[in-house]
Amino acid sequence: MSSTNSNTQGAWEDRWTKPTFDMLMSVYDPAGRKRILEQLFANFDEFDNIRREIVWHGSAWKWTEQFILVDSKGKDIDILVFFVPNPETPQICVPLRKDFIDSLPMKRLNKFVREGIRSAVAKCAVEVAWASWSPNASTEVEHLTDLFKRKYKFMTGDKK
């Protein structure tokens, strides 16, 4: 492993030094995983009232980027998505409440998203199911963007 790779992986694991988004993304291949993740985040950034924040989440998730829905005054409403930038397997984690899951047209959702939700629900012992995905293709980005859009509309009451 090169020293650059070692230093950037260390950025994710170094609890005492808050990394930048670019530092967290630097471990990924620019033509592969990095391009796919950046496409997903660019899609998320198109939504209004979303604030991004990098937060330490303990020994499992370490430095994690949160996509937070805020009101018109900038006050946090809820976290829509977590990005866990594990250098080996980055995860997109979406907390899903039962009322939102019940509102989803499960048969119309793409299999990639549907299976992630079903797996999370099967393991769920509390009120929130934690669905997670590690996108590897642009098509998976589009399906995750669709889920993000559905959750965003559900939480904002947007009927468009």
Image (cartoon, grey):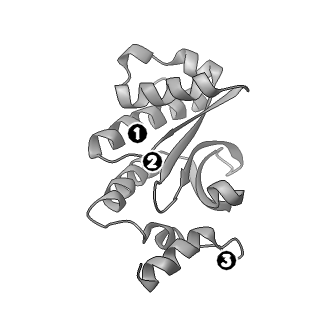
Of the two numbered discs 3 and 2 on the same chain, state the one appearing first in sequence: 3
C-alpha gap between disc 2 and disc 1 = 7 Å
Q: Is label 2 in a helix, a strand or a loop?
A: helix
In percent of the image, x 64 and y 61: which residue is there? 62
Q: Amino acid at mark 3?
A: Thr
Residue beneath disc 1? 145
Kindly tell me whether residue 158 is visible in this rendering: no
- Quarter holding the N terminus is bottom left
Residue beneath disc 2? 44
The crowd level at tag 1 (other Cα within 10 Å; few <14, some 14-19, many 20+) is some
Residue 107 screen position, x and y as percent: 39, 14
C-alpha gap between disc 3 and disc 2 = 26 Å
**Foreground of the two, 101 or 16:** 16
Do the CB atoms of the residues marked 2 and 1 lie less than 8 Å apart?
yes
C-alpha gap between disc 1 and disc 3 = 31 Å
In percent of the image, x 41 and y 38: which residue is there? 144
Q: Amino acid at mark 2?
A: Phe
Classify residue 141 as left or right of residue 69. Answer: left
Residue beneath disc 3? 17
The crowd level at tag 3 (other Cα within 10 Å; few <14, some 14-19, many 20+) is few
Look at the picture and state if 160 lies above or below 87.
Answer: above
Of the two numbered discs 2 and 1 on the same chain, state the one appearing first in sequence: 2
Look at the picture and state if 136 lies above or below 30.
Answer: above
Identify the image quadrant of residue 51.
bottom right
Of the two numbered discs 1 and 3 on the same chain, state the one appearing first in sequence: 3
Identify the image quadrant of residue 11.
bottom right
- Quarter holding the C terminus is top left
